[in-house]
Amino acid sequence: MARAALAGLLALLLALAGCAALADLGELRADLESAGYDATNINNNTTNGFTVLSIDVSMPDAVPTDEDAERVAEVVWRKYQDDFDQLLVTMNGAVRLDATPEDLTGLFGDRPGDVAAADREDGSSATTTVIVVVVCAVVFAGLMVLVWLRGRRPPPPPLAPPGHHQPGGYYQYPPPPPQG
């Protein structure tokens, strides 16, 4: 019963970590759709503390322009809640915009107060929250595996009193009767 409860708690922690990361990306996808763009893939990838936000947009009925890429970037700049170090906008398979937050500030001005990381109450990002939750869940899962494995060890064989040798190296008590 306790193992089932611990497994359920672990599943809940992992689900919360995934939901926190997906919520911001889902809102961004909805914002892009309301602006008239079909975002086929949105990826927020952090490697060694450098975060790249990649957005693939499909425009099958039109030829994408740099203005389209800038409109997508403006939606990201004004609506996306998380921080990033680089924004890549790919339209119909070709990279149309590669920008840093400084480039976007030059194009669109400062981010709105409810989006800018500097104006957040705690200064943290959703990515940091997700990383902390995932690390805690992994440590918790490792401890649960160790506890589970410890409970599965067989007990040591019983020791017999001295002088009562049994074949195979074990002692038997009481000694067997003499054969004869």
Image (cartoon, rainbow, N blue to C red):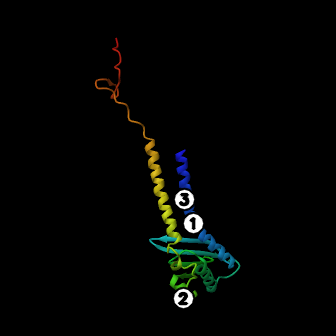
Which residue is tagged 2? Answer: 106
Amino acid beneath label 2: Gly
From the top left corner, tell me how far across and down residue 49 is, in percent. 45, 72
Q: Is residue 144 left or right of residue 23?
A: left
The x and y percentages for residue 138 are: 48, 57
Q: Which residue is tagged 1?
A: 20
User: Which is more toward the observer, 175 or 90?
Assistant: 175
Q: Earlier in the sequence, mark 1 or mark 3?
A: 3
The quarter of the image holding the C terminus is top left
Percent x, y of residue 111: 56, 83
Q: What residue sits right under mark 3 in the picture?
A: 14
Rendered residue at 54%/86% (across/down): 105
User: Based on the displayed image, in which of its 4 quarters is residue 89 positioned?
Assistant: bottom right
Q: Is residue 130 above or below residue 54?
A: above
Q: Amino acid at mark 3?
A: Leu
Tell me the SS state at disc 1.
helix
| Mark 2 element type | helix
Q: Amino acid at mark 1?
A: Ala
| Mark 3 secondary-structure assignment | helix
Of 7 and 76, nearer the camera is 7
